[in-house]
Image (spheres, rainbow, N blue to C red):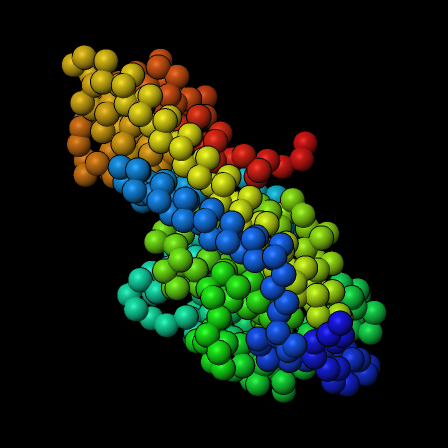
Amino acid sequence: MRGLTGHYAVTQAGGEKVRAFVPDPLPPKPAVVWDASLQRLAQQAMLAIGRLDGLTGLLPDVSQFLYAYIRKEAVLSSQIEGTQSSLSELLLFENADSPVVPTDDVLEVSNYVAALEHGLRRLKRGFPLSLRLIREVHGVLLKKGRGSEKSPGEFRTSQNWIGGTRPGNALYVPPPPDELTACLGALEKFLHDDPVATPPLEKAALAHVQFETIHPFLDGNGRIGRLLVTLLLCHERVLSQPLLYLSLHLKQHRSTYYELLERVRATGAWEEWLAFFYEGVIATADQAAGTTKRVLRLFQDHQRCVAALGPAAPTAARLHDLLQRHPLLSINRARKLLDGEPAFSTLGAAFSRLEDLGVVEEKTGAARGRVFAYKDYIKILSEGTELPV
């Protein structure tokens, strides 16, 4: 039994003295006990990731799938924080010709997409996974809308807390500001395999808990902590494409997730956390692989339907390809994305053909400014993001 995985520091916050938790550096001491069950889960998790990563080679253009899949993750991760935005609402907001005014919830999800894409783009260009990159991603996440007044891109200089109405009755109080530099410096070293090399999946699991424990920002820590898992796995080349996200698993098992974070801090239950994490990776990777296969079949089925349209097939096929990248489109935006060709009337007719085939459905009911949704594609991607009625 390890017991407490850190120490408490007495600090002033909100005019009262509180005990703030300061975690020990990673890796855990004593070391993780790898019994047969945990070893088996770790192996199964890596195999599941391998199967998922292999499927990306079957997609004619993986960027088509990633566009919408990343947005699904943004919706799920933001829902954990209490937002009430759906995937369709996000896609509608992103449709430049839609008159929709974004709610705070939709804007928050849109910021998450931008933050994730910024981090992935920086890694692709060779920028290291580092505290600087984490700050950059956070700056994008809170650049506008809710939370924009809470020091985007800057580590906190004041005490925060989780739960409760004040620090004195909080469920958890993270490290004091004067302890952050040491905590975050140790975390960055661990990400860079200092003091010891750690297998990528184990590293992602341990680093996620450590980041959530440190809670270095005034807002957005949960979303950044979940992003860190994906960024790390892409940086370590465990994933060639960012297709693995744990937000759905964490949303479905939220109470267990929070309970395990606290148990790691209080009793050193790293093995229990790792088992939960690996189970989530297996379930999430298998679900994502199934979704990828279903999407691929859907695209192929509709391609065959479109090819049978005769003279109208070429324009409808171009439009169908575009809908795979942008599953919610107006005629105006489609024309812009196709560099002004074909004519507005030709595109309108192509949308009507796709509507007759059941590929798209019109969402506005208006005579002008109509917006069409690739309904079956959005339906597949929306699974797990549905809001309670």
Q: Is residue 15 above or below residue 323?
A: below
Report the front residue among 9 and 177. 9
Q: Quadrant of the N terminus?
A: bottom right
Q: Quadrant of the C terminus?
A: top right
* Quadrant assignment, res 326: top left
Report the front residue among 358 and 231. 231
Residue 218 % position (x, y): 61, 70
Taking the spot 75% from the left edge, 82% from the top edge, the residue there is 8
Taking the spot 39% from the left edge, 64% from the top edge, the residue there is 236
Residue 14 % position (x, y): 77, 78
Q: Is residue 19 left or right of residue 226?
A: right
Report the front residue among 140 and 56. 56
Residue 30 % position (x, y): 65, 77
Can residue 211 be seen in the rendering of this structure? yes
Residue 377 % position (x, y): 42, 30
* Quadrant assignment, res 366: top left
